Image: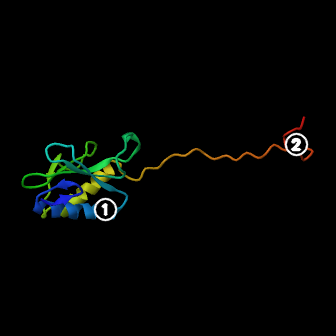
Amino acid sequence: MPNVHGIEFNANQSELVKDLVRELLKDGNCVVYALNNMKPNGELRMATTLPTPNRREVGGVFLRIRPGINQATIVRPMNAKAGDPLTKLAKITQAETLELIRIWRKETKSGPILIKSMPITIEAPNILPTGKSGQTGR
């Protein structure tokens, strides 16, 4: 069985999954990773950033693909509203599926994460009226 990013798919499924992942990677700003511990056969996920221990500070998962007996299954993200909860991946509907996944990416707000930074202030050295620095020698 062919391996796609660490998850084993049937031969006909693997080519469809690879094509779908390639097209989404062309959009940029996303990563693909496998969850091998998902039962029974694992799950392939796409997100804007890699998973970390503190998931609340990173971008969300906008695509989940599970291998099946006959066809791979695409699982809709929890906070997306478009499409069915489970979609079978097929060559005939691949263009429609790609557009639906792009909609999911917008709905899940999986765009680039902007980190708020503290304003940088530069303090001037303390200079006495005599022109000497603020340190006094005792």
The kind of secondary structure element at disc 2 is loop
Front residue of 76 and 19: 19
Pointer 2 or 1: first along the chain: 1
Residue that sits furthest to the front in the current view: 138
Q: Which mark is residue 25?
A: 1
Model colouring: rainbow
> Residue tagged by mark 2?
128
Cα gap from disc 2 to disc 1, whole angstroms: 60 Å
Quadrant the N terminus occupies:
bottom left
Compared with residue 93, is residue 114 higher up or lower down, i.e. above or below? above
Q: Position of residue 5 (x, y in %)?
A: 24, 57
Compared with residue 28, is residue 61 higher up or lower down, i.e. above or below? above
Q: Position of residue 120 (x, y in %)?
A: 63, 47
- Amino acid marked by disc 2: Leu
Q: Position of residue 68 (x, y in %)?
A: 10, 51
Front residue of 6 and 26: 6
